[in-house]
Image (tube, grey):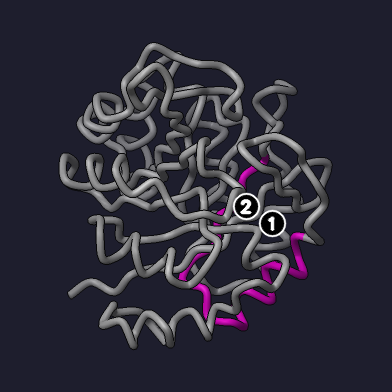
Amino acid sequence: MLKKRIIPCLDIMDGKVVKGVCFEDIRDAGDPMELAERYVAEGADELVFLDITATIEKRKTLLATVEKIAAKINIPFTVGGGIEGKEDVLQLLRAGADKVSLNSAELKRPQLISEIAGEVGSQCVVVAMDTKFTSGSWKVFKHGGRIATNLLTLNWAIEATALGAGELLLTSINNDGKQQGFALDITQEVAEHVHVPVIASGGAGSMEDFGNVFSSTGATGALAASVFHFGTIAIPDLKLFLLQQQIPVRL
């Protein structure tokens, strides 16, 4: 059985790690270099770095910071923010990223997924989906969760994988930062309809929340920020807990 992945996320604003609730009320959560090194030492399976204002500010991802982090870690490293085309992806890969996360640009031009997958391989392409339950359905939002689209989340998940996405990062805006559990319903719905790994994101508050998302859905990874940044949950303790629940993880 495939081992489940525990994935800390570094949301970057103005060069610092930040965290909010439902994509709002942003607060400082620490230094990206220090946190990255700590998570490697604690046994994180992967690390995600998201420059959360790059698209809004119409600028590129912080390449210098990506290079510094990549030089210090030895786990898979996914980077997103401000990606508009293949050259942006190649720059991030040259800087040390293993995978890139697309969020807003491919909603404007879905064929971008195929172009990037054709250039660097689907295994490098993570499509990040910020989703919100509104007016009776789960819909995709863009620009850091600020702008609604007309896309149904499940339909976009299926289309994105057909275009070449090798992985989906599914974040529930409703659950984000509340620490009351992942959005199990949409996570399971997406996971059972696509053939690529799905990372659940948004809402982790306890070790039981991780156990629930792995036992109740087909998610292969669970991403969190606050509970790791502020020491609510230590990754070694979490992995031992999951093993006790018969959920396979790497120690």
- Residue range corresponding to the magenta coloring: 32-51
33 is higher (above) or lower (below) than 79: below
For residue 192, side relative to residue 156 (left or right): left
Above or below, 216 against 37 in this view is: above
Q: Look at label 1 and name its amino acid.
A: Glu
Q: Is residue 27 left or right of residue 214?
A: right
CB under 8 Å between discs 2 and 1? yes
Query: 91 or 106, which is in the foreground?
Result: 106
State the image coordinates of residue 132 (x, y, percent, origin top left). 45, 29
Which residue was labeled with disc 1? 67
Image x and y of residue 212, in percent = 34, 64
Q: Is residue 49 magenta?
A: yes
Which of the 4 image quadrants contains residue 56? top right
Which type of secondary structure does the marked residue at label 2 adopt?
helix
Q: Residues within 10 Å of mark 1 (few under 14, many from 20)?
A: some
The spot of residue 201 in percent (x, y) is: 47, 50
First in sequence, mark 2 or 1: give its number.
1
Q: In the rendered view, tell whether residue 140 sits above or below residue 181.
A: above
Task: Name the residue that disc number 2 marks.
Answer: 95
The image quadrant of residue 120 is: top left
Q: Amino acid at mark 2?
A: Ala
**Residue 52 shown left or right of residue 106 in the figure:** right
The residue at the point 80 percent across, 47 percent down is: 27
Q: Residue 203 or 121: which is nearer the viewer?
A: 203
